């Protein structure tokens, strides 16, 4: 992977010679300190509009007219340089950043700032680092962006996006995700995930109040800003191709027992509890072991029957970039195809395929027109299309079927019978046929989203230098259609066996229940929305000697209308208004101050409370600019201190008009009449009126330091804290005499503190002439605590109070171990969690009350908050890259810590829930039994029924979900204008938890697994 790294300016000296004819000059542009090629650097002939850009090798070729002798080289964040061309036709040009990187431009809210003037906490990343063999951009966030916590819970094609938060979670509910801005306009996470890194010019994360206050209520949880590429003034267009093909395989798979083991364990579970006669005879077990007849003695591994181990994916991108002094353009097209892991079993039985197949098409078209020297019009259009084909049932439902079908009770199908016109699927009471459930139907989904931005930029330097204004109007249209086709199926079971004419054991079949229609029935649904956004902005940016001043004021307004509203509230368009401003001052690139404000209006609050004002202020001090720093400046090249404080708001926009009552006119019923003979429908409150509801408000504090050592090692460290108050919550203390349910009354009732640290480091070094190395690391720690919450009076049982705990913590029974014998059961506190307690069952700790007394009973009052939250408190990443001539290599590790999961949904048998569940292999490997009375066994005493005592959420099922992954490795070779590479992602996982990928979280592990991907690609620039 080629990286653009910082360095210094060195130009190969060249004499000046008169030239009498036009000629072609070529060469390379590199970073002076590292020797890395600078990709996309601009090369222009001075005085004319002839220009080009460097390719993947940093190489260029340009036509030099006869009367021109000077070339101009520039690159964002580097000092530009002019070189007088002599007789030589090949130039080696090395560009250098300013030692303090003061002129590097960083994208911030509503604009850009020089890095040297930056006092807020902003993290940027090169778009190439986000390139992963996945259809979702967010899978590349974890460990690469300091301050961003990201976890990927699912590997399903088209749905493998990561959940991500900026500096953790500071509130309750679903309003925890950051604001995402694409080319100045808010988009949702699905649209972000559909972006191809090839179209991204810059990617910034705004973390503190100074950076986010401009967005007011929208920026409370942090902001991600993505800017797409523009065209360039070039003598000929630059064309880029990229093609990749990949093989994906699960990082882990659920292991279940074979039929013989299943039957033996089932029989044991009956005998060990004394709950009846064993259902599986020894003849049945022996016949299965011998493989006598697969219909009478089935042994089905449902996972192997339903899923394959390899899937093929392809990705293609084409983009072109060019322009002139009047018009420039950038156009990109991406096509991506992903297939799923489902075996095409439906084609074995029907005429259709129901494996996952996702086609994604993405187009970016950016055009800038300079109407005059001071007026520019820009049009940016982003279009994303997704065509998804797959099974009717969800992937989690399909994987969950592995537990609902055991290996011993039925085959997949019985042989066809010419007297019936349908497939004879295997069936049994309390057991579903997973294959039949999977293949009897399919679903097609088509989604399209278009974002079109039209902007006008006007420079008013003719009035006063540094004054400018801009206007933006944006239109978004989202459309979704779904068509499902599904059918019933007929299952059969063996009603008896007999000896056939051939002397072998044969069977008789009977259909289970009534015959079902196998004709595909069709259903469809549609959805969509439209959004119009307008924005007007005035900017002023001027330098007076050592003084740098800038100011900005922006107004914005947004309206969103749903295409298929489901209620009166949702039929009304959502509207937002906002006003924001920024003022910055810097003296001598040394003393810096910035003030921001956001003033926002929300329809969710009553009159008098609809508008919120959210100010912030930040200061910075570049210590390394002081004279006294000179003696150590060679070692510590740059040292900046910065701090910020401000307010942010959140209007919990997922709940419309939250201050108003919400009723369902037919949500309840009542009876009347002398004998109650009349039943009438009546209204029910979904929410009671509360006109005092107002904004969630967060106080954000940030202290940071930026360091650079020897112009090679860059370090950025931030300490942060946010206290979010007035959090919108349901009341937990509504008195019963009010006559209403507790789920109906809401208010500003919560308070959460979130604090932590994020750190990023990068290092570059050149060894000799052709060898370059670089390293990078990030670390994020974010811990939240509930400070206030309206909850029941837990004075007697303080262990139940959520106050002082993490927002995402687990409330669990504290398991001590398994009972040694029945005598211990007799003399232990009575456990009232379900089922008769015996030796080998889980023993729980009786928690004391507030006075230190024990009630000698295990019930819901004995739960405690245990473990770490499911959302990791720590996310980190580190990587290394090296380049020697045309060969390059990179590797990146990513991990999490301080995170837990709770296992559930995997308990075997459970006939009281009308199922005969499968058995996971880890249960069979180590469970308590009379022959294995291990009080610390992985699984307690078996039971045919699901006893609550052993299946309730407890610390017995709590696991450490921390992990370290070899997230990505790549090796490539560049030859002229082509680069070939091989890469892999999710290659290795190191974790204490071994049953499935811990990143998938708790439950049974039966969900679409994350994928290990092996990728080969080629990139070519023309």
Image (cartoon, grey):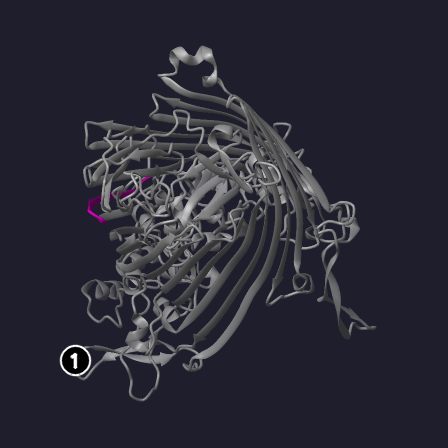
Q: Taking the image as drawn, is residue 190 in sight? A: yes
The one nearer the camera, 426 or 712, is 712
Q: Tell me which corner region of the image, top left, top right, bottom left or bottom right, holds residue 300.
A: bottom left
| Mark 1, residue position | 503
The one nearer the camera, 761 or 934, is 761
Q: Position of residue 138 (x, y in %)?
A: 42, 48
Query: Is 767 positioned to the left or the right of 464 in the image?
Result: left
- Farthest residue in the right direction? 674
Q: Position of residue 697 (x, y in %)?
A: 66, 38
The one nearer the camera, 652 or 996, is 652
Q: Position of residue 541 (x, y in %)?
A: 57, 35
Query: Is 200 positioned to the left or the right of 659 in the image?
Result: left
* On screen, residue 433 above or below 419: above
Q: Taking the image as drawn, is residue 428 in sight? A: no
Report the predominant secondary structure element of the magenta stretch.
strand
Quarter of the N terminus within the rendering? top left
Element at label 1: loop
Q: Position of residue 689 (x, y in %)?
A: 76, 52
Q: Is residue 638 magenta?
A: no
Residue at 43% over, 70% down: 444
- The magenta stretch spans which residues? 965-978
């Amino acid at each position: 992977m080629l990286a653009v790294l910082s360095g210094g300016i060195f130009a190969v000296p060249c004499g000046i010679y008169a030239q009498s004819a036009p000629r072609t000059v070529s060469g390379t542009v590199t970073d002076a300190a590292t020797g890395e090629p600078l990709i996309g650097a601009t090369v222009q002939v001075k005085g004319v509009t002839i220009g080009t850009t460097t390719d993947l090798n940093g190489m260029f070729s340009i036509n030099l007219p006869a009367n021109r002798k000077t070339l101009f080289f520039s690159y964002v964040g580097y000092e530009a340089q002019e070189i007088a061309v002599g007789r030589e036709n090949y130039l080696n040009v090395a560009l250098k950043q300013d030692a303090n990187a003061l002129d590097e431009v960083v994208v911030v809210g509503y604009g850009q700032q020089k890095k040297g003037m930056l006092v807020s906490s902003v993290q940027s990343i090169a778009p190439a680092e986000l390139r992963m063999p996945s259809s979702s951009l967010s899978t590349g966030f974890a460990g690469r962006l300091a301050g961003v916590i990201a976890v990927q819970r699912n590997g399903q094609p088209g749905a493998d996006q990561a959940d991500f938060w900026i500096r953790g979670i500071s509130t309750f509910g679903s309003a925890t995700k950051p604001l995402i801005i694409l080319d100045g306009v808010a988009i949702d996470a699905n649209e972000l995930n559909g972006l191809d890194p090839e179209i991204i010019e810059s990617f910034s994360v705004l973390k503190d109040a100074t950076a986010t206050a401009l967005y007011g209520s929208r920026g409370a949880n942090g902001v991600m800003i993505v800017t797409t590429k523009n065209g360039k003034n070039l003598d000929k267009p630059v064309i880029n191709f990229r093609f990749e093909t990949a093989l994906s395989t699960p990082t882990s798979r659920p292991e279940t027992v074979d039929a013989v083991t299943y039957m033996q364990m089932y029989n044991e579970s009956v005998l060990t509890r004394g709950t009846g006669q064993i259902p599986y005879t020894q003849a049945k077990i022996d016949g299965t072991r011998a493989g006598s007849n697969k219909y009478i003695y089935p042994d089905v591994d449902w996972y192997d029957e339903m899923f394959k181990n390899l899937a093929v994916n392809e990705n293609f991108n084409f983009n072109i970039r060019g322009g002139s002094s009047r018009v420039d353009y950038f156009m990109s097209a991406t096509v991506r195809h992903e297939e799923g892991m489902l075996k095409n079993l439906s084609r074995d039985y029907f005429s259709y395929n129901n494996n996952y197949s996702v086609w994604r098409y993405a187009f970016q078209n950016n055009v800038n027109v300079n109407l005059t020297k001071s007026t520019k019009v820009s049009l940016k259009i982003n279009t994303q299309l997704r065509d998804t084909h797959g099974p009717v049932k969800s992937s989690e439902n399909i994987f969950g079927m592995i537990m609902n079908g055991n290996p011993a009770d039925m085959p997949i199908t019985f042989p066809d019978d010419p007297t019936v016109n349908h497939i004879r699927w295997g069936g049994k009471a309390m057991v579903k046929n997973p294959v039949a459930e999977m293949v009897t139907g399919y679903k097609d989904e088509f989604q399209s989203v278009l974002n079109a931005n039209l902007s006008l930029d006007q420079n008013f330097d003719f009035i006063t230098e540094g004054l400018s204004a801009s206007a933006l109007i944006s239109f978004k249209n989202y459309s979704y259609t779904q068509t499902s086709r599904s059918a019933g199926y007929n299952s059969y079971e063996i009603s008896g066996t007999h000896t056939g004419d051939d002397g072998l054991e044969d069977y008789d079949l009977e259909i289970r229940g009534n015959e079902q229609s196998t004709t595909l029935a069709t259903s469809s649904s549609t959805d969509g929305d439209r959004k119009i956004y307008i924005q007007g902005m005035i900017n002023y940016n001027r330098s007076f000697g050592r003084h740098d001043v800038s100011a900005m004021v922006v107004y914005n307004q947004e309206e969103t209308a749903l295409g298929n509203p489901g209620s009166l509230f949702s039929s009304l368009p959502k509207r937002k208004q906002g006003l924001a401003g920024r003022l910055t001052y810097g003296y001598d690139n040394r003393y810096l101050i910035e003030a921001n404000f956001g003033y926002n209006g929300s329809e969710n609050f009553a009159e008098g409370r609809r508008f919120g004002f959210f100010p912030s202020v930040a200061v910075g001090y570049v210590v390394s600019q002081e004279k006294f720093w000179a003696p150590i400046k060679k070692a510590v090249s740059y040292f900046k201190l910065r701090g910020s404080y401000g307010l942010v708001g959140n209007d919990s926009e997922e709940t419309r008009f939250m201050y108003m009552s919400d009723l369902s006119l037919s949500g309840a019923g009542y009876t009347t009449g002398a004998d109650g003979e009349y039943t009438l429908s009546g209204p029910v409150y979904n929410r009671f009126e509360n006109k005092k509801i107002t904004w969630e408000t967060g106080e954000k504090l940030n202290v940071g330091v930026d360091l650079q050592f020897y112009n090679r090692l860059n370090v950025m460290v931030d300490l942060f804290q946010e206290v979010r108050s007035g959090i919108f919550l349901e009341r937990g203390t509504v008195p019963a005499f009010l006559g209403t349910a507790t789920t109906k009354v809401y208010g500003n009732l919560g308070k959460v503190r979130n604090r932590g640290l994020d750190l990023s480091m990068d290092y570059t070094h050149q060894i000799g002439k052709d060898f370059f190395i670089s390293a990078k690391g990030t670390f994020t720690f974010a811990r939240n605590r509930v400070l206030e919450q309206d909850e029941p009076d837990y004075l007697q049982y303080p262990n139940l109070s959520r106050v002082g705990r993490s927002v995402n913590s687990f409330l669990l029974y504290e398991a001590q171990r398994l009972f040694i014998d029945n005598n211990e059961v007799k003399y232990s506190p009575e456990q009232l969690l379900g089922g008769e307690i015996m030796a080998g069952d889980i023993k729980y700790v009786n928690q004391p009350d507030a006075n230190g007394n024990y009630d000698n009973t295990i019930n819901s009052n004995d739960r405690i908050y245990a473990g770490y939250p499911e959302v990791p408190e720590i996310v980190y990443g580190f990587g290394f890259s090296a380049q020697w001539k045309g060969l390059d290599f990179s590797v990146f590790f990513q991990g999490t810590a301080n995170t837990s999961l709770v296992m559930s949904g995997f308990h075997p048998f459970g006939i009281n829930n009308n199922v005969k569940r499968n058995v996971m292999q880890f249960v069979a490997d180590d469970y308590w039994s009379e022959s294995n009375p291990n009080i610390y066994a992985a699984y307690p005493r078996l039971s045919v029924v699901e006893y609550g005592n052993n299946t309730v959420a407890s610390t017995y099922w709590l696991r450490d979900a921390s992990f370290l992954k070899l997230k990505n490795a790549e090796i490539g070779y560049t030859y002229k204008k082509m680069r070939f590479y091989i890469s892999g992602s999710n290659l290795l996982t190191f974790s204490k938890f071994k049953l499935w990928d811990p990143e998938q979280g708790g439950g049974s592990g039966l969900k679409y697994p994350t994928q290990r991907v092996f990728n080969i690609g080629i990139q070519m620039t023309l």
